[in-house]
Amino acid sequence: GVEKGDRVVIYMPMIPEAVIAMLACARIGAVHSVVFGGFAPHELAIRIDDAKPKVLVTASCGIEPSRTIAYKPMVDRAIEAAEHPPSAVVVKQRPEVAADLMEGRDLDWDVAMRLGRTSPAGVVEVGATDPLYILYTSGTTGKPKGVVRDNGGHAVAMTWSLANVYDIGAGDVWWAASDVGRVVGHSYIVYAPLLAGATTLMYEGKPVGTPDAGAFWRVIAEHRVKALFTAPTAIRAIKKEDPAAVHVGEYDISSLELLFLAGERLDPDTFAWATQHLGVPVVDNWWQTETGWPIAANLRGLEPMELKAGSPSVPVPGYDVRVLDPDGAPLPAGSEGAIAIKLPMPPGTLPTLWGDDERYVNSYLSTHEGYYLSGDGGFIDQDGYLYVMGRTDDVINVAGHRLSTGAMEAVISQHPAVAECAVIGLADPLKGQLPRGFVVLNAGVEADPDDIRSELVAMVREEIGAVAAFRAVDVVGGLPKTRSGKILRRTMRDIADGKQAQVPSTIEDAGVLDTLTPVLRQGE
Ligand code: COA
Ligand code: AMP
C-alpha cells in the first residue's frame, strides 16, 4: 500500500535487505528514513512520530561483537510509544533470532517478496526536488533534525563526487565501511557507487573483535578493494590492538590505492600511522549529514594535491567556504572562527528539515545573513587549506556517531533526585570524544551518589542507546551559570580540556568554578 510520497522507516542491521528496502522506496517514489540500529526504542519512536511512516521495515536481529540484539521487541516498544505508528511492519527473519509477528500488522519479508514477484511494482517518476529520503541527525536539543534529501541534486552530487573526490568509476570495487543508518552509508554504500556502476561492499562487522584487527585488510584482500572509506576511530581501534600493523603484512592489500577518512577530526597521529603502514594516500574529507557529500576534500579524481596532516584540504567545487567572526565578518588566514558556507549551497545539500522549514532557517541560515552555518569551528591557512577543529555547539562526536548532549541532559533531568545537569563532550584517545555528565542533586536527597550515577548511566543507555557510550557522571555541588540561568558548558569544556577558559562577566557565582575545576580536570 505504499505510494509516492509516503514515508517508510527502515530500522535494520547491515544486511543487503536494508539496501533493497531503501532502493524499493526510491523506485516507487516513497521517502525512506533509515534509523541507525544503535538507537534505543525511545529514539526510534521520536523519529516515527516525526516521519509518520506508513510502513516500518526491520529484521529480527543485529549482530554485535558482544551479543546478538533482538530488534523486533525494540520495534514493538517504539511503536507502542509512538503517536503515529505505522500500519504495517515488514520483518526479515534472520537465522540467529526468530521474531514474533503480530497478526494483522506484521509481515514476513520473505513472504512479501514472494507476493511481490508475481506483480512487481513499476517505476514511479518523481520531480528532481521531490524528497528521496529523510535522515535524522542530532541537533542541539533532544529533538533530532530530519535532514531532507531531494532526488535530482542528490544524484548529480553523488555521481560527481564519487568520480572527482574519490576517484571511483564503473567496475571499481569500493568499500565504505560505515553503516546504512548514517549519511556515509546512504551516500557511499548505497547511492553513489550504484549510480556510478561501481561495486559496493557491505560489511556487518567491526574493525576489531570480528575476529581481530586484521579484518579490514582481509576484506580488502578477498574482494580486491580499490579504496576504503571509514572513520578515524576505526583506524585508532586497529592501531591500539595492532600498533606495529602486523596484520597488514598477513594479507595482499596491493589492490588498495586510497584510504578515505571522515566523520570526525582526523588527528595527525592516526594520519601518520595509516600513511606509514598502508603506503597509500590517506585522505581526510569533511562534511555532514546536512550536505550529504564532502565540503572539503583532496580531489583524488580531479586534481590530487599535497596532503597536510590535520586538514581535509580545500573546499570542494560548489562550496564557497568562509571562516567568520562572531559578527559574521570573514576572518583572515590563520584566524579561527565559525566555518560557514556562502549561499547558495550546491546540489544535493539539504533543501529543508522535514516538516519544519522554520527550524531549518533558524538552525542554519539565520545567524549570519547569506551564509549556511556548519556548526564547526576552524581556520583556513595561507595555502587555502581548511582545518576543522570541532563543533561550536552542543553536538558531540563519539566514535563517529553524532550525538546531542542536550538529548542526554533531557534524559538525566527526568531522574527525581536531579535538580540540574550538564553533559559535555571530553577528548578520548579512542573514540575522539566521550560524554561526561555533571549533576546537582535536589536538596535533601539522601540516596548514595554511586547508586544515582549507575541509575543515570542506565537511563541514558535505555532511552538513547548504547552508542551514546555514556558512562561517566559526577555529582557536584553546583554548575557555573550566567545570571540569566544559562549553564556555561563552553567554559566547562575548556577547563576540562586544559585550555584557558573564557569566563563571561555575566557569571552568577565564579566560586562554583573553583570547586568544579578539580573535578573537570580529573582523568585528563
Ligand atoms: N546496533 C545495535 N547496537 C549497536 C550498533 C548497532 N548498529 N552499533 C553499536 N552498537 C552498540 C555496541 O554494541 C556497543 O554496545 P556495548 O556498550 O554494549 O558494548 C555500543 O553501541 C557502542 O558501540 P561502538 O560505538 O561500536 O563502540 P565499541 O566500543 O563497541 O567499538 C569501535 C569501538 C571504534 C571499534 C567502533 O566504534 C567502530 O567501529 N567505529 C567506527 C565507526 C564507523 O565506522 N563510522 C563510520 C562513519 S564514516
Ligand atoms: P555527521 O552529520 O554525523 O556526518 O557529523 C558531522 C560532523 O562530524 C561535522 O559537523 C564535524 O563536526 C564532524 N566531522 C565530520 N567529518 C570531519 C572531518 N573530516 N574533520 C573534522 N570533523 C569532521
Image (spheres, rainbow, N blue to C red):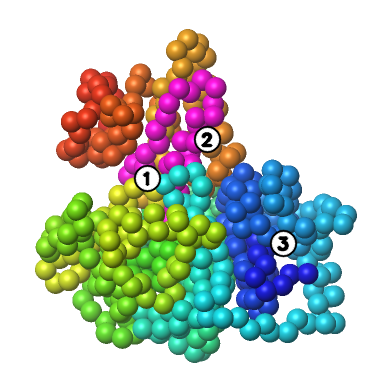
Quadrant in which the N terminus is drawn? bottom right
Residue at horizontal 40 percent and vertical 80 percent from the top: 161
Q: Earlier in the sequence, mark 1 or mark 3?
A: 3
Question: Dot 2, crowdedness within 10 Å: few (<14), some or many (≥20)?
Answer: some
Magenta-tinted stretch:
398-427
User: Which label's residue is closer to the chain start, 1 or 2?
Assistant: 1
Q: Is residue 348 magenta?
A: no
Q: Which mark is residue 54?
A: 3
In this view, the residue farthest toward the right is 103
Question: SS at mark 3?
Answer: loop
The amino acid type of the residue labelled 2 equals Val
For label 3, count other residues whose C-alpha is less than 10 Å away and answer few (under 14), some (14-19) or many (20+).
many
* Position in image of residue 361 (x %, y %): 40, 58
Is residue 227 visible to us here? no
User: In the rendered structure, which amino acid carries the disc numbered 1?
Assistant: Asp
- The spot of residue 25 in percent (x, y) is 66, 73
Q: Which residue is mark 2?
A: 411
Q: Where residue 271 sits: x, y (%)?
A: 29, 63
Q: Quadrant of ligand 2?
A: bottom left
Q: Secondary structure at mark 1?
A: loop
Per the image, the residue denoted by label 1 is 394
How packed is label 1: few (under 14 Cα within 10 Å), some, or many (20 or more)? many
| Mark 2 touches mark 3? (CB < 8 Å) | no
* Residue under the image location 24 percent in, 39 percent down: 494
Q: CA distance from mark 2 to mark 3?
A: 28 Å
Is residue 185 rendered to the left or right of residue 437?
A: right
- Front in this rendered view, residue 182 or 278: 182
